[in-house]
Image (spheres, coloured by chain):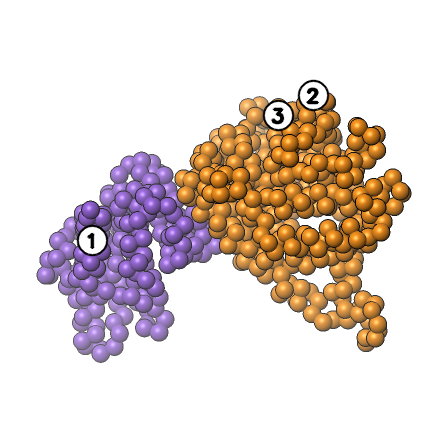
Amino acid sequence: MSAPIREDFREILRLVKPGSRVLDVGCEDGELLELLTREKGVDAQGLEISPENVSACLAKGLAVVQGDGDRDLDHFPTRAFDYAILSKTLQQMREPKHVLSELLRIAERAIVSVPNFAHWRMRLSLMTRGRMPETRALPDPWWATANIHLCTLKDFTDLCRDLGLRIEACAAMSAGKPARSMDPDGVLENWRAETAIFLLSRAD
Amino acid sequence: MTRAATAIPEIEINGGTMRFPAGRALRLDSGAKLEPLEIAYETYGRLNADKSNAILVCHALTGDQHAASTHPVTGKPGWWDRVIGPGRPLDPSRYFIICTNVVGGCMGSTGPASTNPATNQPYGLAFPVITIGDMVRAQAMLIEALGVETLLAVVGGSMGGMQVLQWAADFPDRLFSAVCIAAAPRHSAQNIAFHEVGRQAIMADPDWRGGAYEQAGVRPEKGLAVARMAAHITYLSEAALQRKFGRQLQRDGLSWGFDADFQVESYLRHQGAAFVDRFDANSYLYITRALDYFDLAAQHGGVLANAFQRARMVRFCVLSFASDWLYPTSESRDIVRALNAAGARASFVEIETDKGHDAFFLDEPQLDAALRGFFASTAQARGLA
Protein backbone atom coordinates (compact mmCIF):
# COMPACT_ATOMS: atom_id res chain seq x y z
CA MET A 1 0.00 0.00 0.00
CA SER A 2 2.55 2.58 1.10
CA ALA A 3 6.33 2.78 0.97
CA PRO A 4 8.23 1.14 3.83
CA ILE A 5 8.74 3.36 6.85
CA ARG A 6 12.13 5.06 6.96
CA GLU A 7 14.36 3.65 9.70
CA ASP A 8 14.83 6.98 11.46
CA PHE A 9 11.05 7.53 11.43
CA ARG A 10 10.59 4.05 12.87
CA GLU A 11 12.93 4.96 15.72
CA ILE A 12 11.10 8.26 16.34
CA LEU A 13 7.78 6.40 16.34
CA ARG A 14 9.20 4.14 19.03
CA LEU A 15 10.32 7.08 21.20
CA VAL A 16 7.16 9.21 21.06
CA LYS A 17 4.43 8.49 23.59
CA PRO A 18 0.89 8.15 22.23
CA GLY A 19 -1.36 11.20 22.35
CA SER A 20 1.49 13.65 22.94
CA ARG A 21 1.99 17.09 21.41
CA VAL A 22 4.73 17.05 18.79
CA LEU A 23 6.53 19.77 16.85
CA ASP A 24 8.56 18.61 13.84
CA VAL A 25 11.12 21.25 12.91
CA GLY A 26 11.80 20.97 9.18
CA CYS A 27 8.85 18.65 8.60
CA GLU A 28 9.20 18.72 4.78
CA ASP A 29 6.03 17.33 3.19
CA GLY A 30 4.69 16.13 6.55
CA GLU A 31 5.43 12.42 6.12
CA LEU A 32 6.61 11.93 9.70
CA LEU A 33 3.83 14.03 11.20
CA GLU A 34 1.26 12.05 9.25
CA LEU A 35 2.80 8.82 10.47
CA LEU A 36 2.85 10.02 14.08
CA THR A 37 -0.76 11.18 13.81
CA ARG A 38 -1.88 7.88 12.36
CA GLU A 39 0.17 5.51 14.50
CA LYS A 40 0.41 7.43 17.78
CA GLY A 41 -2.56 9.78 17.72
CA VAL A 42 -0.30 12.76 18.41
CA ASP A 43 -1.30 16.40 18.18
CA ALA A 44 1.06 17.31 15.35
CA GLN A 45 2.50 20.68 14.40
CA GLY A 46 5.23 21.39 11.87
CA LEU A 47 7.70 24.11 10.98
CA GLU A 48 8.89 24.06 7.38
CA ILE A 49 10.83 26.49 5.23
CA SER A 50 9.49 25.68 1.75
CA PRO A 51 6.05 27.10 0.87
CA GLU A 52 5.38 24.19 -1.52
CA ASN A 53 5.95 21.74 1.31
CA VAL A 54 3.71 23.74 3.65
CA SER A 55 0.93 23.63 1.05
CA ALA A 56 1.41 19.86 0.76
CA CYS A 57 1.10 19.62 4.55
CA LEU A 58 -2.08 21.75 4.55
CA ALA A 59 -3.61 19.35 2.03
CA LYS A 60 -2.91 16.53 4.46
CA GLY A 61 -4.72 18.43 7.20
CA LEU A 62 -1.54 19.08 9.14
CA ALA A 63 -0.95 22.29 11.05
CA VAL A 64 2.30 23.68 9.70
CA VAL A 65 3.87 27.10 10.05
CA GLN A 66 6.21 28.27 7.32
CA GLY A 67 9.43 29.35 8.90
CA ASP A 68 13.08 28.83 9.50
CA GLY A 69 14.31 26.75 12.44
CA ASP A 70 17.16 29.22 12.89
CA ARG A 71 14.86 32.20 13.31
CA ASP A 72 11.31 31.20 14.02
CA LEU A 73 11.38 28.85 16.99
CA ASP A 74 10.61 31.92 19.07
CA HIS A 75 7.09 31.68 17.58
CA PHE A 76 6.34 28.95 20.03
CA PRO A 77 5.62 29.45 23.70
CA THR A 78 7.57 27.69 26.44
CA ARG A 79 6.62 24.04 27.09
CA ALA A 80 4.02 24.09 24.32
CA PHE A 81 4.97 20.56 23.23
CA ASP A 82 5.92 17.20 24.68
CA TYR A 83 8.43 16.57 21.88
CA ALA A 84 10.33 18.74 19.44
CA ILE A 85 11.86 16.77 16.59
CA LEU A 86 14.85 17.87 14.53
CA SER A 87 15.96 15.28 11.98
CA LYS A 88 19.45 15.56 10.51
CA THR A 89 19.35 19.34 10.21
CA LEU A 90 21.07 20.62 13.37
CA GLN A 91 24.35 20.69 11.42
CA GLN A 92 22.70 23.01 8.86
CA MET A 93 21.69 25.60 11.44
CA ARG A 94 23.56 28.85 11.83
CA GLU A 95 23.39 28.57 15.61
CA PRO A 96 23.02 24.92 16.55
CA LYS A 97 23.61 25.56 20.23
CA HIS A 98 20.85 28.13 20.40
CA VAL A 99 18.51 25.95 18.37
CA LEU A 100 19.10 22.98 20.66
CA SER A 101 18.35 25.02 23.74
CA GLU A 102 15.26 26.50 22.05
CA LEU A 103 13.97 23.00 21.26
CA LEU A 104 14.13 22.20 24.95
CA ARG A 105 12.47 25.46 25.88
CA ILE A 106 9.39 24.82 23.78
CA ALA A 107 9.21 21.07 24.45
CA GLU A 108 9.73 18.77 27.42
CA ARG A 109 11.86 16.51 25.27
CA ALA A 110 13.74 16.80 22.01
CA ILE A 111 14.45 14.07 19.48
CA VAL A 112 17.52 15.10 17.53
CA SER A 113 19.51 13.19 14.95
CA VAL A 114 22.94 14.20 13.65
CA PRO A 115 25.41 12.65 11.21
CA ASN A 116 28.60 11.60 13.01
CA PHE A 117 31.68 13.16 11.40
CA ALA A 118 33.92 10.69 13.27
CA HIS A 119 32.36 7.65 11.56
CA TRP A 120 35.08 5.41 10.14
CA ARG A 121 34.05 6.13 6.56
CA MET A 122 34.64 9.84 7.16
CA ARG A 123 37.98 9.25 8.81
CA LEU A 124 39.10 6.87 6.10
CA SER A 125 37.97 9.18 3.33
CA LEU A 126 39.79 12.14 4.83
CA MET A 127 42.92 10.12 5.55
CA THR A 128 43.23 8.43 2.19
CA ARG A 129 42.01 11.19 -0.10
CA GLY A 130 43.10 14.20 1.88
CA ARG A 131 39.91 15.95 0.88
CA MET A 132 36.64 16.79 2.61
CA PRO A 133 34.86 13.43 2.95
CA GLU A 134 32.09 12.61 0.52
CA THR A 135 30.27 9.58 1.87
CA ARG A 136 26.81 8.07 1.59
CA ALA A 137 25.77 9.95 4.74
CA LEU A 138 27.23 13.27 3.56
CA PRO A 139 27.36 13.02 -0.23
CA ASP A 140 27.79 16.66 -1.32
CA PRO A 141 31.12 18.36 -2.11
CA TRP A 142 32.29 20.96 0.42
CA TRP A 143 31.29 23.89 -1.77
CA ALA A 144 27.71 22.67 -2.23
CA THR A 145 26.89 21.19 1.14
CA ALA A 146 24.24 22.69 3.38
CA ASN A 147 26.10 21.29 6.38
CA ILE A 148 27.92 24.19 7.97
CA HIS A 149 28.25 22.88 11.53
CA LEU A 150 29.25 19.25 11.37
CA CYS A 151 30.15 17.49 14.58
CA THR A 152 31.14 14.12 15.94
CA LEU A 153 29.28 11.98 18.41
CA LYS A 154 31.69 13.13 21.12
CA ASP A 155 31.21 16.79 20.20
CA PHE A 156 27.47 16.43 20.40
CA THR A 157 27.43 14.73 23.80
CA ASP A 158 29.80 17.47 25.05
CA LEU A 159 27.35 20.13 23.86
CA CYS A 160 24.48 18.34 25.61
CA ARG A 161 26.46 18.35 28.86
CA ASP A 162 27.30 21.99 28.30
CA LEU A 163 23.61 22.87 27.97
CA GLY A 164 22.66 20.73 30.95
CA LEU A 165 20.72 18.23 28.85
CA ARG A 166 20.13 14.63 29.81
CA ILE A 167 20.44 11.93 27.15
CA GLU A 168 17.52 9.67 27.91
CA ALA A 169 18.07 7.38 24.97
CA CYS A 170 20.53 7.11 22.12
CA ALA A 171 20.69 4.92 19.04
CA ALA A 172 23.04 4.49 16.11
CA MET A 173 21.67 4.39 12.58
CA SER A 174 23.14 3.37 9.27
CA ALA A 175 21.40 3.61 5.93
CA GLY A 176 18.81 0.90 5.50
CA LYS A 177 19.48 -0.77 8.85
CA PRO A 178 17.29 -0.76 11.94
CA ALA A 179 18.38 1.64 14.69
CA ARG A 180 20.66 0.07 17.31
CA SER A 181 20.62 1.29 20.89
CA MET A 182 24.06 2.48 22.01
CA ASP A 183 26.03 4.12 24.79
CA PRO A 184 26.87 7.56 23.40
CA ASP A 185 30.08 7.63 25.45
CA GLY A 186 31.24 4.24 24.20
CA VAL A 187 34.69 4.66 22.64
CA LEU A 188 33.96 2.48 19.64
CA GLU A 189 30.59 4.06 18.95
CA ASN A 190 32.28 7.25 17.79
CA TRP A 191 33.76 5.11 15.00
CA ARG A 192 30.76 2.93 14.31
CA ALA A 193 27.71 5.18 14.38
CA GLU A 194 27.02 6.74 10.98
CA THR A 195 24.15 8.80 12.33
CA ALA A 196 23.08 9.14 15.96
CA ILE A 197 19.61 9.84 17.25
CA PHE A 198 19.04 11.21 20.75
CA LEU A 199 16.13 11.60 23.10
CA LEU A 200 16.99 14.63 25.22
CA SER A 201 15.45 16.34 28.21
CA ARG A 202 16.47 19.08 30.58
CA ALA A 203 18.51 17.72 33.45
CA ASP A 204 16.79 19.99 36.00
CA MET B 1 -23.61 12.52 -3.72
CA THR B 2 -24.62 12.44 -7.37
CA ARG B 3 -23.06 14.68 -9.92
CA ALA B 4 -24.10 15.59 -13.41
CA ALA B 5 -21.75 13.73 -15.67
CA THR B 6 -22.20 15.81 -18.79
CA ALA B 7 -22.24 19.49 -17.97
CA ILE B 8 -20.51 21.69 -15.42
CA PRO B 9 -23.09 22.11 -12.68
CA GLU B 10 -24.63 25.55 -12.49
CA ILE B 11 -23.94 27.46 -9.31
CA GLU B 12 -27.05 27.99 -7.29
CA ILE B 13 -27.00 31.70 -6.42
CA ASN B 14 -29.40 33.23 -3.95
CA GLY B 15 -29.36 36.48 -2.15
CA GLY B 16 -31.09 39.67 -1.33
CA THR B 17 -31.38 41.91 1.67
CA MET B 18 -32.17 40.68 5.16
CA ARG B 19 -34.15 43.22 7.16
CA PHE B 20 -33.86 43.24 10.92
CA PRO B 21 -36.78 45.26 12.24
CA ALA B 22 -36.58 47.85 14.99
CA GLY B 23 -36.20 45.98 18.25
CA ARG B 24 -33.48 43.82 16.71
CA ALA B 25 -30.98 46.63 16.65
CA LEU B 26 -27.29 46.20 15.97
CA ARG B 27 -25.49 47.41 19.09
CA LEU B 28 -22.36 49.21 18.03
CA ASP B 29 -18.98 49.39 19.76
CA SER B 30 -19.39 53.17 19.90
CA GLY B 31 -22.41 52.69 22.17
CA ALA B 32 -24.86 53.72 19.45
CA LYS B 33 -27.56 51.44 18.01
CA LEU B 34 -28.39 50.85 14.38
CA GLU B 35 -32.04 50.11 13.61
CA PRO B 36 -33.59 49.12 11.39
CA LEU B 37 -30.69 47.13 10.02
CA GLU B 38 -30.41 45.74 6.52
CA ILE B 39 -27.73 43.32 5.41
CA ALA B 40 -27.31 42.60 1.71
CA TYR B 41 -25.90 39.17 0.98
CA GLU B 42 -25.41 36.48 -1.58
CA THR B 43 -25.13 32.72 -1.19
CA TYR B 44 -23.71 30.08 -3.51
CA GLY B 45 -24.65 26.44 -3.22
CA ARG B 46 -26.94 24.83 -0.72
CA LEU B 47 -26.88 24.34 3.04
CA ASN B 48 -26.65 20.61 3.70
CA ALA B 49 -29.01 18.65 5.96
CA ASP B 50 -26.88 18.86 9.10
CA LYS B 51 -25.94 22.47 8.36
CA SER B 52 -22.23 21.76 8.51
CA ASN B 53 -21.05 23.11 5.15
CA ALA B 54 -21.50 26.88 5.53
CA ILE B 55 -18.54 29.11 4.73
CA LEU B 56 -18.62 32.86 5.27
CA VAL B 57 -16.52 34.93 2.88
CA CYS B 58 -15.64 38.42 4.13
CA HIS B 59 -14.85 41.17 1.65
CA ALA B 60 -12.16 43.83 1.69
CA LEU B 61 -12.50 47.63 1.97
CA THR B 62 -14.13 48.25 -1.39
CA GLY B 63 -15.59 44.80 -2.02
CA ASP B 64 -19.18 43.70 -1.64
CA GLN B 65 -21.42 40.64 -1.53
CA HIS B 66 -20.90 39.87 -5.23
CA ALA B 67 -17.99 37.52 -4.57
CA ALA B 68 -18.78 35.11 -7.39
CA SER B 69 -21.56 36.71 -9.39
CA THR B 70 -21.48 39.38 -12.06
CA HIS B 71 -21.31 42.82 -10.47
CA PRO B 72 -24.55 44.72 -11.12
CA VAL B 73 -22.76 48.06 -11.63
CA THR B 74 -19.54 47.15 -13.40
CA GLY B 75 -20.69 44.00 -15.19
CA LYS B 76 -17.40 42.36 -14.17
CA PRO B 77 -17.08 38.87 -12.64
CA GLY B 78 -17.26 38.58 -8.86
CA TRP B 79 -14.17 39.72 -6.97
CA TRP B 80 -13.30 36.18 -5.86
CA ASP B 81 -14.60 34.37 -8.91
CA ARG B 82 -11.20 32.68 -9.18
CA VAL B 83 -11.66 30.91 -5.85
CA ILE B 84 -15.42 30.30 -5.73
CA GLY B 85 -16.93 28.08 -8.41
CA PRO B 86 -17.20 24.54 -9.73
CA GLY B 87 -13.86 22.76 -9.36
CA ARG B 88 -12.33 25.72 -7.53
CA PRO B 89 -11.13 25.69 -3.89
CA LEU B 90 -14.59 26.84 -2.71
CA ASP B 91 -16.91 24.67 -4.75
CA PRO B 92 -20.62 25.53 -4.36
CA SER B 93 -21.54 21.92 -5.12
CA ARG B 94 -19.89 21.10 -1.80
CA TYR B 95 -20.17 24.18 0.37
CA PHE B 96 -22.86 26.72 1.20
CA ILE B 97 -20.95 29.96 0.66
CA ILE B 98 -22.22 33.21 2.15
CA CYS B 99 -20.95 36.70 1.44
CA THR B 100 -22.43 39.82 3.00
CA ASN B 101 -21.98 43.49 2.27
CA VAL B 102 -20.48 44.97 5.45
CA VAL B 103 -22.50 47.31 7.57
CA GLY B 104 -21.46 50.82 6.51
CA GLY B 105 -21.14 49.63 2.92
CA CYS B 106 -22.95 50.94 -0.13
CA MET B 107 -24.25 47.85 -1.93
CA GLY B 108 -27.44 47.34 0.03
CA SER B 109 -26.40 46.98 3.66
CA THR B 110 -27.23 49.82 6.02
CA GLY B 111 -24.65 52.55 5.56
CA PRO B 112 -24.27 56.31 5.46
CA ALA B 113 -26.31 56.50 2.21
CA SER B 114 -29.26 54.68 3.84
CA THR B 115 -32.24 56.60 5.09
CA ASN B 116 -31.93 57.86 8.64
CA PRO B 117 -35.30 57.01 10.28
CA ALA B 118 -34.97 60.09 12.49
CA THR B 119 -34.89 62.51 9.55
CA ASN B 120 -36.06 60.52 6.51
CA GLN B 121 -32.92 61.84 4.83
CA PRO B 122 -29.73 59.94 4.00
CA TYR B 123 -27.66 59.50 7.16
CA GLY B 124 -24.55 61.20 5.83
CA LEU B 125 -22.36 62.07 8.79
CA ALA B 126 -25.20 61.28 11.19
CA PHE B 127 -24.34 57.64 10.57
CA PRO B 128 -22.58 56.25 13.64
CA VAL B 129 -18.91 55.30 13.40
CA ILE B 130 -18.66 51.55 12.95
CA THR B 131 -15.94 49.02 13.70
CA ILE B 132 -14.76 45.66 12.39
CA GLY B 133 -16.47 44.19 15.46
CA ASP B 134 -19.77 45.77 14.38
CA MET B 135 -19.41 44.31 10.89
CA VAL B 136 -18.86 40.87 12.39
CA ARG B 137 -21.79 41.17 14.77
CA ALA B 138 -24.05 42.08 11.83
CA GLN B 139 -22.74 39.04 9.93
CA ALA B 140 -23.47 36.84 12.93
CA MET B 141 -27.06 38.10 12.93
CA LEU B 142 -27.42 37.28 9.26
CA ILE B 143 -25.87 33.83 9.59
CA GLU B 144 -28.28 33.03 12.38
CA ALA B 145 -31.21 34.28 10.31
CA LEU B 146 -30.09 31.93 7.52
CA GLY B 147 -30.32 29.02 9.96
CA VAL B 148 -26.57 28.48 10.30
CA GLU B 149 -25.30 27.84 13.82
CA THR B 150 -21.70 26.92 13.11
CA LEU B 151 -19.57 27.97 10.18
CA LEU B 152 -17.30 25.39 8.62
CA ALA B 153 -14.99 28.31 7.86
CA VAL B 154 -14.79 32.04 7.80
CA VAL B 155 -12.38 33.36 5.19
CA GLY B 156 -11.27 36.74 3.97
CA GLY B 157 -8.38 38.86 2.77
CA SER B 158 -7.23 42.31 3.82
CA MET B 159 -10.13 43.88 5.77
CA GLY B 160 -11.87 40.53 5.27
CA GLY B 161 -8.99 38.91 7.12
CA MET B 162 -9.46 41.31 10.01
CA GLN B 163 -13.10 40.28 10.17
CA VAL B 164 -11.91 36.68 10.30
CA LEU B 165 -9.71 37.47 13.31
CA GLN B 166 -12.57 39.33 14.97
CA TRP B 167 -14.86 36.35 14.38
CA ALA B 168 -12.33 34.08 16.09
CA ALA B 169 -12.11 36.44 19.04
CA ASP B 170 -15.85 37.10 19.42
CA PHE B 171 -17.60 33.93 18.23
CA PRO B 172 -15.06 31.10 18.49
CA ASP B 173 -17.74 28.53 19.32
CA ARG B 174 -19.51 29.26 16.03
CA LEU B 175 -16.41 28.53 13.96
CA PHE B 176 -14.72 25.33 12.90
CA SER B 177 -11.91 27.02 10.99
CA ALA B 178 -10.63 30.46 10.03
CA VAL B 179 -8.57 31.62 7.05
CA CYS B 180 -6.93 35.03 7.32
CA ILE B 181 -5.21 36.30 4.16
CA ALA B 182 -2.94 39.36 3.80
CA ALA B 183 -4.23 41.03 6.93
CA ALA B 184 -2.93 42.51 10.17
CA PRO B 185 -4.01 42.42 13.81
CA ARG B 186 -4.12 46.23 13.86
CA HIS B 187 -3.72 49.23 11.63
CA SER B 188 -0.21 50.65 11.70
CA ALA B 189 0.62 54.35 11.67
CA GLN B 190 1.42 54.03 7.97
CA ASN B 191 -1.95 52.35 7.27
CA ILE B 192 -3.78 55.12 9.12
CA ALA B 193 -1.71 57.76 7.34
CA PHE B 194 -2.65 56.52 3.88
CA HIS B 195 -6.32 56.38 4.85
CA GLU B 196 -6.16 59.89 6.19
CA VAL B 197 -4.87 61.10 2.81
CA GLY B 198 -7.87 59.46 1.16
CA ARG B 199 -10.36 60.90 3.59
CA GLN B 200 -8.90 64.39 3.30
CA ALA B 201 -9.13 64.15 -0.49
CA ILE B 202 -12.85 63.36 -0.21
CA MET B 203 -13.55 66.03 2.38
CA ALA B 204 -11.58 68.64 0.41
CA ASP B 205 -13.87 68.12 -2.60
CA PRO B 206 -16.39 71.02 -2.62
CA ASP B 207 -19.04 68.55 -3.73
CA TRP B 208 -18.69 66.59 -0.51
CA ARG B 209 -20.89 69.22 1.23
CA GLY B 210 -20.10 68.08 4.75
CA GLY B 211 -21.32 64.61 3.81
CA ALA B 212 -24.77 65.79 2.68
CA TYR B 213 -23.96 65.63 -1.05
CA GLU B 214 -26.85 63.36 -1.95
CA GLN B 215 -29.45 65.93 -0.86
CA ALA B 216 -27.63 68.51 -2.99
CA GLY B 217 -27.71 66.20 -6.00
CA VAL B 218 -23.93 66.10 -6.36
CA ARG B 219 -21.16 63.59 -5.56
CA PRO B 220 -17.56 64.24 -4.48
CA GLU B 221 -16.25 62.25 -7.41
CA LYS B 222 -12.91 64.00 -7.72
CA GLY B 223 -12.09 63.53 -4.06
CA LEU B 224 -13.15 59.89 -4.04
CA ALA B 225 -11.15 59.21 -7.20
CA VAL B 226 -8.00 60.71 -5.65
CA ALA B 227 -8.58 58.63 -2.50
CA ARG B 228 -8.78 55.52 -4.64
CA MET B 229 -5.68 56.44 -6.62
CA ALA B 230 -3.60 56.89 -3.47
CA ALA B 231 -4.93 53.66 -1.97
CA HIS B 232 -4.40 51.73 -5.19
CA ILE B 233 -0.66 52.41 -5.06
CA THR B 234 -0.52 50.66 -1.69
CA TYR B 235 -2.16 47.55 -3.17
CA LEU B 236 0.64 47.04 -5.69
CA SER B 237 4.30 46.33 -5.15
CA GLU B 238 6.95 48.57 -6.63
CA ALA B 239 8.14 45.65 -8.76
CA ALA B 240 4.65 45.00 -10.13
CA LEU B 241 4.14 48.67 -10.95
CA GLN B 242 7.54 48.84 -12.63
CA ARG B 243 6.94 45.67 -14.64
CA LYS B 244 3.49 46.77 -15.75
CA PHE B 245 4.28 50.38 -16.66
CA GLY B 246 7.91 51.32 -16.17
CA ARG B 247 8.30 54.79 -17.66
CA GLN B 248 6.24 53.96 -20.72
CA LEU B 249 4.40 56.84 -22.29
CA GLN B 250 0.79 57.03 -23.39
CA ARG B 251 1.67 58.67 -26.71
CA ASP B 252 4.87 59.34 -28.61
CA GLY B 253 6.76 62.02 -26.77
CA LEU B 254 6.01 64.18 -23.77
CA SER B 255 3.16 66.66 -23.69
CA TRP B 256 5.24 69.25 -21.82
CA GLY B 257 2.20 69.71 -19.61
CA PHE B 258 0.14 67.87 -17.05
CA ASP B 259 -1.80 65.43 -19.17
CA ALA B 260 -1.36 61.77 -18.31
CA ASP B 261 1.93 61.37 -20.18
CA PHE B 262 2.91 58.19 -18.39
CA GLN B 263 0.92 55.00 -18.61
CA VAL B 264 0.97 54.66 -14.85
CA GLU B 265 -0.79 58.03 -14.54
CA SER B 266 -3.43 57.01 -17.02
CA TYR B 267 -3.90 53.70 -15.21
CA LEU B 268 -4.39 55.38 -11.84
CA ARG B 269 -6.81 57.94 -13.30
CA HIS B 270 -8.79 55.09 -14.80
CA GLN B 271 -8.83 53.26 -11.45
CA GLY B 272 -10.12 56.40 -9.74
CA ALA B 273 -12.76 57.14 -12.37
CA ALA B 274 -14.08 53.58 -12.45
CA PHE B 275 -14.25 53.43 -8.67
CA VAL B 276 -16.56 56.42 -8.23
CA ASP B 277 -19.20 54.69 -10.37
CA ARG B 278 -19.56 51.89 -7.87
CA PHE B 279 -18.65 53.32 -4.48
CA ASP B 280 -20.05 55.89 -2.09
CA ALA B 281 -17.69 58.52 -0.68
CA ASN B 282 -19.19 58.50 2.82
CA SER B 283 -18.97 54.70 2.94
CA TYR B 284 -15.30 55.09 2.10
CA LEU B 285 -14.87 57.44 5.07
CA TYR B 286 -16.68 55.12 7.47
CA ILE B 287 -15.07 51.87 6.40
CA THR B 288 -11.54 53.30 6.38
CA ARG B 289 -12.28 54.60 9.89
CA ALA B 290 -13.38 51.13 10.99
CA LEU B 291 -10.06 49.79 9.72
CA ASP B 292 -8.06 52.50 11.49
CA TYR B 293 -9.85 51.76 14.76
CA PHE B 294 -9.05 48.05 14.45
CA ASP B 295 -6.61 46.85 17.11
CA LEU B 296 -7.41 43.34 18.25
CA ALA B 297 -4.79 43.25 21.01
CA ALA B 298 -6.06 46.52 22.49
CA GLN B 299 -9.49 44.92 22.82
CA HIS B 300 -7.86 42.21 24.95
CA GLY B 301 -5.68 43.98 27.47
CA GLY B 302 -2.91 44.69 25.00
CA VAL B 303 -2.05 41.01 24.51
CA LEU B 304 -2.94 39.62 21.09
CA ALA B 305 -2.80 36.01 22.30
CA ASN B 306 -5.62 36.80 24.73
CA ALA B 307 -7.91 37.47 21.76
CA PHE B 308 -7.57 33.80 20.79
CA GLN B 309 -7.80 32.21 24.25
CA ARG B 310 -11.29 30.91 23.54
CA ALA B 311 -10.45 29.92 19.95
CA ARG B 312 -8.18 26.97 20.72
CA MET B 313 -10.47 24.52 18.95
CA VAL B 314 -10.56 26.59 15.75
CA ARG B 315 -8.26 25.49 12.93
CA PHE B 316 -6.45 28.57 11.64
CA CYS B 317 -4.74 29.18 8.33
CA VAL B 318 -2.83 32.44 7.96
CA LEU B 319 -1.50 33.47 4.55
CA SER B 320 0.61 36.45 3.53
CA PHE B 321 2.26 37.70 0.35
CA ALA B 322 6.01 38.29 0.27
CA SER B 323 5.73 41.63 -1.57
CA ASP B 324 2.75 43.02 0.37
CA TRP B 325 3.89 46.25 2.01
CA LEU B 326 0.40 47.32 3.10
CA TYR B 327 -0.01 44.41 5.52
CA PRO B 328 3.45 42.83 5.39
CA THR B 329 4.30 39.25 6.34
CA SER B 330 5.60 40.39 9.73
CA GLU B 331 2.00 41.28 10.68
CA SER B 332 0.80 37.79 9.75
CA ARG B 333 3.68 36.32 11.74
CA ASP B 334 2.51 38.31 14.77
CA ILE B 335 -0.91 36.72 14.34
CA VAL B 336 0.63 33.24 14.09
CA ARG B 337 2.81 33.86 17.13
CA ALA B 338 -0.25 34.90 19.13
CA LEU B 339 -2.21 31.87 17.94
CA ASN B 340 0.63 29.59 18.98
CA ALA B 341 0.89 31.32 22.33
CA ALA B 342 -2.83 30.79 22.84
CA GLY B 343 -2.41 27.11 22.01
CA ALA B 344 -4.52 27.30 18.86
CA ARG B 345 -3.93 25.08 15.85
CA ALA B 346 -2.31 27.36 13.30
CA SER B 347 -0.85 26.99 9.85
CA PHE B 348 0.97 29.75 8.04
CA VAL B 349 2.37 30.23 4.53
CA GLU B 350 4.08 33.26 3.04
CA ILE B 351 3.29 33.12 -0.65
CA GLU B 352 6.17 34.07 -2.94
CA THR B 353 4.86 36.69 -5.33
CA ASP B 354 5.95 40.15 -6.43
CA LYS B 355 2.38 41.32 -7.05
CA GLY B 356 1.90 43.02 -3.69
CA HIS B 357 -1.22 43.16 -1.55
CA ASP B 358 -3.58 42.67 -4.50
CA ALA B 359 -2.12 39.20 -5.17
CA PHE B 360 -5.11 38.10 -3.14
CA PHE B 361 -7.37 38.73 -6.15
CA LEU B 362 -4.93 37.55 -8.79
CA ASP B 363 -3.83 34.30 -10.30
CA GLU B 364 -1.56 32.83 -7.64
CA PRO B 365 -1.29 29.04 -7.96
CA GLN B 366 0.37 28.80 -4.54
CA LEU B 367 -2.56 30.60 -2.92
CA ASP B 368 -5.03 28.32 -4.68
CA ALA B 369 -3.07 25.23 -3.62
CA ALA B 370 -2.94 26.33 0.00
CA LEU B 371 -6.66 27.18 0.07
CA ARG B 372 -7.64 24.00 -1.74
CA GLY B 373 -5.62 21.85 0.65
CA PHE B 374 -6.80 23.61 3.76
CA PHE B 375 -10.51 23.57 2.86
CA ALA B 376 -10.40 19.94 1.70
CA SER B 377 -8.77 18.75 4.91
CA THR B 378 -11.05 20.95 7.01
CA ALA B 379 -14.12 19.49 5.32
CA GLN B 380 -12.77 16.02 5.93
CA ALA B 381 -12.09 16.76 9.60
CA ARG B 382 -15.65 18.10 9.90
CA GLY B 383 -16.95 14.85 8.41
CA LEU B 384 -18.20 16.23 5.10
CA ALA B 385 -18.37 13.67 2.32
**Residue sitting nearer the eye, B13 or B214:** B214
Q: In this view, does B191 lie above or below B117?
A: below
Q: Do labels 1 and 2 share a chain?
A: no
Specify whether B366 is left or right of B244.
left
Answer left or right for A119 relative to A139: left
* Label 3 residue SS: helix
Residue at the (56%, 38%) spot, across then down = B166
The residue depicted at 79 percent of the width and 53 percent of the height is B204
Residues at badges 1 and 2 in contact (C-beta under 8 Å)? no
Task: Read off the residue under disc 3.
Answer: B144
Q: B162 and A7: which one is in front?
A: B162
Gap in Å between the C-alphas at discs 2 and 3?
16 Å
Q: What residue type is labelled 3?
A: Glu
Protein chain holding label 2: B
Image coords of residue A197 (percent x, y)? 23, 53
What type is the residue that disc 1 sits on? Gly
Chain B colour as displayed: orange
Which residue type does callout 2 highlight?
Answer: Gly
Q: How crowded is mark 3: few (under 14 residues within 10 Å), some or many (20 or more)?
A: few
* Residue B315 shows up from this direction: no
- Mark number displayed over residue A164: 1
